[in-house]
Structures are given as structure tokens and as C-alpha cells.
Amino acid sequence: MSKIGNKQIPVPVTVTMSIVGSEVNVKGKEGEMKIVLPKTLSISNENGFVTVKRLNEKSETKALHGLFRSILANAVTGVEKPWEKKLEVVGTGFNVKMQGEDLVFKVGFSHPVIFTKVPKVTFAVSGTNKVTLKSIDKQLVGEVAYKVKMLKKPDAYKGKGIKYENEKLRIKPGKKAKTA
């Protein structure tokens, strides 16, 4: 029995949710998201709470039950207050700046690296080394943040590169830390 899938999703008064067949449209002050449920799940909206139910007891349906409940809960949260990821550029001479709507990174290559704007994701730069990504779609903002991080992932010896804001890096000892 899915413990996540059985939880009800509270829908705030600032969020409207319309259900047409297997398509759910979530609309709030920050934007609008459409989610299409699989045919093995049903959804009901009663008294400001949304419930996702299974139509059969197959293992695939049980897996989808919790997944789509979480996707709907993240959509409700995202249209009310956008999801955000914060990244830091660490290293001597490494920096980031906005150029129009694109990000321009100087991260130790012979040329600056340009990361073009992604639809439905907003970029913000504070200082010369902090980037904030915001979107109503939690999965999309995480995916874009990972792609930005992979432009120059932190190296194992000095930690130079692009990392998440509170990420703890494991720094390897150099040649001098030889064990006898």
C-alpha cells in the first residue's frame, strides 16, 4: 500500500485546480501547469483536498500512484511559490554574469561558456559568483541546475568549479599526503 500516494494534497485558496478526464490543470499566481495522469489512476477534488486513487492493484500502478501524487503536490506548491536552486562558482578568476537573458561563465577555459535561457526558468545572478534558478516546475529547475553544474563540475583536489550552494565536497589529499 502506497503511503505517499494515499496522502491528500491540500489546495490553497490562491490555487485553482481543474480536472478534465485524466488531465489536471493547476493554476496559481506564479503560472499554470498541466499534468496528464495515466489511465490506471483517478483523481478527485473535495473540500480543498485532492486525492489520487488507483484503479487496480498492479505493481506498476502502485509505483505510479505515489509518483503522480508527488508530482501534483509539487505543482500545487510551485504555482504558489516557485521552486529555486542556488549555485556557486568557486575558484580564482571564476565568475558568472548575465548577458541579456543568458548566463556567461568564466570557469578556467580559454573562452567564456554561454548557457542560453531555458523556457519557463528564470536566472538571477548576485555578485560575481552566485546564480539562482527559479521555476514553477520542480523537475525542470533541478534538471537545468544540474546541466549548469556540469559545465565545470568541482574538481576533487581544490574544489574549483560550479557547485550547489550548501553542497559539501570531498576534497582529496594531494601527493604530499602519502601514507607510509
Image (tube, rainbow, N blue to C red):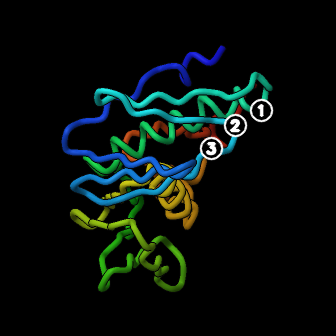
Rendering coords of residue 126 (x, y %): 22, 63
Quadrant of the snapshot with the N terminus = top right
Q: CA distance from mark 1 to mark 2?
A: 9 Å
Q: Earlier in the sequence, mark 1 or mark 2?
A: 2
Rendering coords of residue 170 (x, y %): 56, 37
Q: Write down the residue under mark 2.
A: 40
Residue 3 versus residue 154 in the image, above or below: above
Amino acid at circle 1: Glu
Q: Write down the residue under mark 1.
A: 60
Res. 55 image quadrant: top right
Q: CA distance from mark 3 to mark 2?
A: 55 Å
Residue 47 versus residue 24 in the image, above or below: above
Query: At 55% across and 67% down in the image, what residue appears?
Result: 151
Q: Earlier in the sequence, mark 3 or mark 2?
A: 2
Q: Nearer the viewer, mark 3 or mark 2?
A: 2
Q: Write down the residue under mark 3.
A: 174
For label 3, count other residues whose C-alpha is less than 10 Å away and answer few (under 14), some (14-19) or many (20+): few
